[in-house]
Image (cartoon, rainbow, N blue to C red):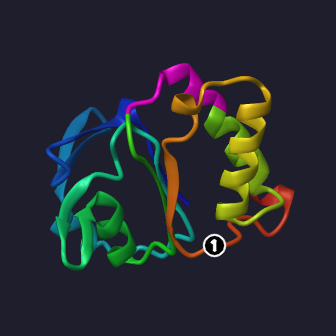
Amino acid sequence: MVRLMEEAWSLHRNKAITMLKWQKRVTLSVEDISNLGLQANMVVLSACHTARGKISSEGVLGLARAFLMAGAKSVVTALWAVNDDATEKFMLKFYDNLSSEPVVNSLATTMCEMKQEKFEVAQWGSFKVLGANVKVFSNISDHN
C-alpha cells in the first residue's frame, strides 16, 4: 500500500507532485509516476482534488491514472477539498474497514458510518476509488 498525504506533498496543476522526503524536496511528474513500476494493491491520495486531471477522450489524465499505469491495482482519490479533521476521521475508519473488506466496500462502509455520525456529505463524499476492488489485507494482523 502507498499512502501520500497532504502534509507530505503538493500538487502542481495535477501534472506533478512535490514530496518532502528526508528533508529534501522531490518532484515527480505524471510521467515519472507512470514509470515507477509499483506493485501496490492500493494507493491513497487523500489530499484535496487528487482526482483532478486533464479530460481527454480516454478519460481523466492525472495523478490517479498515473499510479494505475505504474501498477497500482486501486487508487483512492478526492474530488474536492475536505476539512483536515473530517479527512483524518474518514481515513482512520477507512483503514479500519480495510481489515475485513475490499477497497470499494470499505469506502462505502466508511461513507455510511460518516453519514450515520451526522457528518455533512461534503466531509466524506469526495472520496472515490479508481481501479479494482482489491482486498488489501488478508487478515487484521497484516496492517498492525
12 lies left or right of 82: left
Nearer to the camera, 119 or 46: 119
- Residue at position x 48%, y 22% from top? 83
For the N terminus, the quadrant is bottom right
Counting other residues with Cα less than 10 Å from the Cα at mark 1, is it few (<14), some (14-19), or many (20 or more)? some
**Residue 66: horizontal and vertical position, in percent?**
29, 68
- Residue at position x 29%, y 58% from top? 63
Q: Is residue 62 visible?
A: yes
Nearer to the camera, 86 or 35: 86
* Count of labels in the image: 1
Q: Which residue is mark 1?
A: 133
**Residue 137: horizontal and vertical position, in percent?**
74, 64
- Residue at position x 38%, y 31% from top? 81
Report which quarter residue 36 is drawn in: bottom left
Question: Magenta stretch containing residue 93, yes or no?
Answer: no
Amino acid at the residue labelled 1: Asn
Q: Is residue 87 visible?
A: no
* Relative to 23, residue 77 above or below: below
* Relative to 41, residue 2 above or below: above
Please provide the residue range marked out in magenta: 81-89
Report which quarter residue 85 is drawn in: top right
- Residue at position x 72%, y 33% from top? 115
Nearer to the camera, 99 or 102: 102
Main SS, magenta region, reads helix
6 lies left or right of 46: left
* Relative to 54, residue 23 above or below: above
**Residue 74: horizontal and vertical position, in percent?**
52, 68
